Amino acid sequence: MRVDIDVRHLARIEGHGNIVVRIADGDLKEARWDVVETPRFFEVMLKGKHFSAAGILAARICGICSISHCLTAVRATERAFGVTVPDAAARLRLLAKHGETIQSHVLHFFFLAAPDFLGLSSAIPLVEADPEVLQRALRLKGLANRLCDAVAGRTTHPVAFQPGGVSMVPEKRVLSAIRNELEDGLDDLHATARLLATFEIPDFERETEFVALRGEREYPFIGGRLVSSDGVERAENEYLEMTNEAVVAGNTSKWSSLSRESYAVGPLARCNLNFELLHPEARQIAANLGLAPLCHNPFMAHVARLVECVHCAHEAIRLVDEIVSSGDEPAMVAVAPVAGEGVGAVEAPRGILFHHYRYGGDGRIESANCVVPTAQNNGNIHRDLPDFVRQMVESGVNDDQRLELLCSMLVRSYDPCLSCSVH
Amino acid sequence: MKYLGIDSVRPRIAVFELTGCEGCELQLANKEETLAAFLDAVEVVNFREISSSSSDDYDIAFVDGAVSRADEVERLEVIREHAKVLVALGSCACFGGVSRLKNAFDLNEANREVYGDRPQETLPVRAVSEVVAVDLEIPGCPVSKDEVERIVQHLIWDVPYHFPAYPVCLECKQRYTVCTYEVGLLCLGPITRAGCNAPCPAGGLGCWGCRGPAVEANAEEFLTTVHERGFTNDEIAERMSFFGGFEGLLP
Ligand code: SF4
Ligand code: SF4
Ligand code: SF4
């Protein structure tokens, strides 16, 4: 058996990466995942910037999860200055996070992942083939984007989040209208779960270490302790002991490792490590679709994303109720810069994200480090590939085309964001 | 699609990305109310981020991102050859965008700092028009989908599109936003090209000038006023450099 797979600039992912698989005389010679995205040097560009610019610049690391990057930068800055934001601001930030999570997961599910399971090259043919599915996708994405617009001031590159809190408070009547949409959105999410149940999820497992924030009482999104499924536990400030980044040949993205050669972050890692903190309805959908911790099949991340959407929709409704019934408390406190360092950890849609800044007494950044979700996942994707190819070949897959599609689907199941990963 | 009773062709569209966050092309998939109609009005033949089918036969190429590596120069030259109309989409493509901030640093040192002893290939950041001829520039970080849709309609109808000549201030006042100068914050709204509907002043950030200079802006008057309000040339220049749109116009 001979297989030569060379995917240059894999489609339906964010950014540029290549897959190479070679089988000769029935032996797997090579299986690689290489990130070739052009590096942007954000850690260098952040140097010398005033703290008021940190979140604005950091947001531009990623067009899909700009709210997460902005909030992580702002959180790192606040922790450096010893600032605690008012509850009203924390609630709004979390609400925006839920909007972003739903927006990003829905985009991935319908536009990037589903075409593979439906035998299409993109979601565009759905305009004619299955308008109902496309309309559902657009309703869900539209709802999530309107939530982000209302709370973050814009869906891509938020304008409402600054060190000290939230500088633009949405009108309560706008939030109430979105609350109604969220209720309808839950019906659409249930219909999406029924669609997902018809997808043929590849049967593949590789024992993997998962890393995520660990929630105390709530499913985690902003700040908290760092945990791994192999039993490592660290404080937010000790992130470097979790991430251990290294530069690897042929890649513009770094790779991470902890107890094993690589680890995974993202929706599956979060579900695996915080399952009991999910909303009961989200757990029910997980059970219906066969997701239970600890799950070692990377393709089950598709289920985890949908489960998180249901959780986030319920949480967003709860937050809107809290905000609407609360008084008009201040959402911003004054910020006085001091020399020092701060680390922010946030669960971005694709996994745990760290920003670390050292500030001078003038409120300007002296050094910056960002460890992003996909950079942590790239090593794990690379290590999944050979095992996956072997298992697929053993199970009888023997033509190049089918194997290429399956390998592409494996990479897409991580929802990689390569612009992020090379920041 | 018909406009004034005239049948128009369905242009073949391609979308490419260079160095950027891909936020601008994401806007093309946003605006869910009109997305189905948009996909009906054009034929998307190449859009790697959302489709695995591709073709080199297209009329309009949208390019987002700046140029910062040799392979991007090559890709851009090929795109220029194929496209009838090449559109620079977003501030990265139009001016270099935030990535242009990199040019203020020594690139070898920057490389050592991020990649240690395995430096990566990187060039000073350039706008698309510094590499190939560009037919149309749509600025914004990110671009406004409303504006992109209007422009695409104009391309289909073959009618020139006119960007607003007035500054962001006008749109800001139409929204009844409290002027950020009232609370002592710098804002580039008076000299920046409108078309975004002024989200940043409304968010309490003030305008950072992502769309570049307005045609009808009075830069001298702006400087006099902000000096009076106590802002220094350094502060103003730093803000104007953020998205790269005011190159050569700094105080
Ligand atoms: S202009 Fe802004 S939104 Fe567009 S690609 Fe560049 S950084 Fe992203
Ligand atoms: S906030 Fe800025 S854009 Fe708005 S009116 Fe004031 S100066 Fe003009
Ligand atoms: S207000 Fe200014 S910075 Fe904000 S989008 Fe408009 S031009 Fe860009």
Image (cartoon, rainbow, N blue to C red):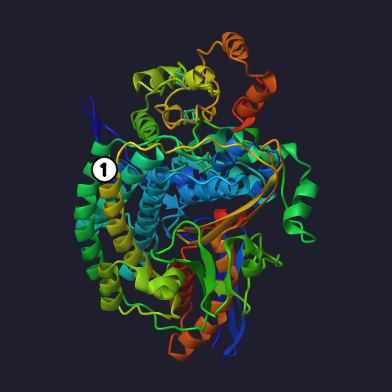
Residue A307 image point, x, y percent? 32, 67
Which quadrant is home to the N terminus of chain A?
Answer: bottom right
Question: In the image shown, does B4 or B181 lie closer to the viewer?
Answer: B181
Ligand 2 has an atom within 8 Å of the beta carbon of the residue at disc 1 = no
Q: Residue at x 46, y 85 (%)?
A: A392
Tell me if residue B228 can be seen.
yes
Residue B118 image point, x, y percent? 77, 61
Residue A83 higher or lower than A301, as above or below: above
Of all chains, the one bearing label 1 is A
Residue B115 image point, x, y percent? 73, 58
Q: Residue at x 53, y 71 (%)?
A: A227
Which residue bears the numbered disc 1?
A: A324
Q: Which image quarter: residue B92?
A: top right
Tell me if residue A405 can be seen.
no
Secondary structure of residue under mark 1: helix
Q: Which amino acid does the dot numbered 1 rest on?
A: Val
Q: Residue at x 39, y 27 (%)?
A: B197
Tally the marks. 1
Residue B116 higher or lower than A57, as above or below: below
Residue B246 image point, x, y percent? 61, 24
- Disc 1 crowd rating (10 Å Cα; few below 14, some 14-19, many 20+) is some
Question: In the image shown, does A72 or B194 lie closer to the viewer?
Answer: A72
Q: Residue at x 55, y 10 (%)?
A: B218
Question: In the image shown, does A151 or A324 lie closer to the viewer?
Answer: A324
Q: Does B10 sit left or right of B99 as displayed?
A: left
Q: Does A152 sit left or right of B211 as displayed?
A: left
Q: Does B151 sit left or right of B67 as displayed?
A: left
Residue A294 higher or lower than B146, as above or below: below
Q: Which image quarter: residue A385?
A: bottom right
